[in-house]
């Protein structure tokens, strides 16, 4: 039973437009959510996070929205840039600090 | 400050061989983790440690062993390698597991078992 799901394996957007990456979770014990970005042949790097007490967190071009009732979160990138092309992983953590990862969404931003 | 370093970067093993994947972090983090990533999949937790001398199993621990004798090092041991262990292995660390969830990852070790 996959507790964190990213249902879109890939997403392609035009440079300058908005990218929206989605993530669903099933475990009600998750209280902290993170997005990581991964380039080929590199390890993932932390991008942005949100606590379950909030419904939105913003950092520059990146905004994460959390809908607890729907057990859904999304990452918005505005405006999208070619350098944003990467695999994006959603992760969720309960209090113990361990994270459960989704399978990732490959974002391609076309110039 | 090198962050999280992993060696080797690549390795080819024959079935039944053993090896140790090395992981070192210089951020004085108490939590350390080992993940594997199979093609098209997410990261699966193999083992983790909340401090020196303390380790625990993750989702997919079979075929692996770990030890944590120091804060800095968290080696992963593969005994009797099998083709199913062909994967990319990532080590990660974080500062306070309860209040800071962000993990810092190493560059990965690509392992092929043939």
Image (spheres, coloured by chain):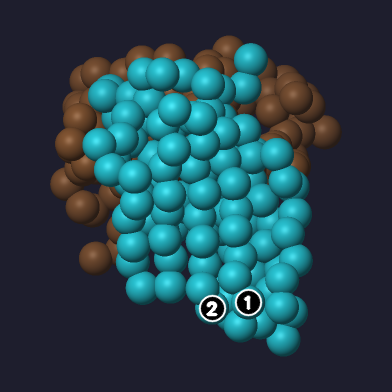
Chain colours: A cyan, B brown
Give the left or right position of residue A13, taking residue A78 as reference. Answer: right
Q: Which residue is mark 1?
A: A17
Location of residue B66 in the rendering, given as x and y in whole percent from the top left corner: 41, 23
Q: Is residue A90 left or right of residue B102?
A: right
Q: Position of residue A49 (x, y in %)?
A: 35, 49
Q: Quadrant of the N terminus of chain B?
A: bottom left
Q: Secondary structure at mark 1?
A: loop
The residue carrying mark 2 is A79
Query: What is the quadrant of the C terminus of chain B in the image?
Result: top right
Which quarter of the figure has residue B96?
top left
Q: Is residue B111 above or below residue A29?
A: below
Closer to the N terminus: mark 1 or mark 2?
Answer: 1
Is label 1 in contact with label 2 (beta carbons under 8 Å)?
yes
Tell me which corner region of the image, top left, top right, bottom left or bottom right, holds residue A82.
Answer: bottom right
Identify which residue is drawn at 58% across, 13% down. B62
Give x and y (percent) for residue B3.
31, 58
- Specify few, some or many for label 1: CA neighbours under 10 Å numbering under 14, 14-19, or 20 or more: some
- Residue with the most extreme bottom position: A111
Q: Chain of mark 2?
A: A
């Amino acid at each position: 039973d996959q507790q964190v799901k990213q249902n879109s394996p890939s997403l392609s957007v035009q440079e300058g437009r908005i990218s929206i990456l989605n993530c669903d979770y099933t475990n009600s014990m998750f209280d902290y959510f993170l997005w990581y970005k991964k380039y080929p042949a590199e390890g993932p790097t932390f991008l942005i996070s949100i606590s379950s007490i909030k419904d939105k967190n913003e950092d520059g071009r990146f905004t994460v929205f959390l809908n607890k009732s729907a057990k859904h979160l999304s990452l918005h990138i505005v405006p999208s840039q070619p350098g944003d092309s990467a695999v994006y992983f959603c992760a969720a953590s309960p209090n113990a600090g361990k994270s459960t990862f989704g399978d990732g969404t490959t974002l391609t931003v076309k110039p | 400050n090198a962050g999280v370093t992993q060696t080797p970067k690549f390795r080819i093993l024959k079935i039944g061989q053993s090896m140790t994947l090395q992981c070192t972090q210089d951020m004085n983090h108490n939590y350390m983790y080992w993940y594997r990533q199979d093609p098209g999949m997410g990261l699966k937790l193999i083992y983790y440690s909340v401090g020196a001398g303390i380790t625990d199993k993750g989702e997919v621990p079979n075929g692996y062993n770990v030890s944590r004798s120091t804060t800095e090092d968290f080696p992963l041991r593969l005994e009797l390698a099998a083709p199913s262990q062909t994967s990319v292995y990532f080590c990660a660390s974080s500062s306070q597991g309860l209040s800071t969830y962000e993990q810092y990852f190493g560059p990965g070790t690509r392992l092929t078992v043939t």
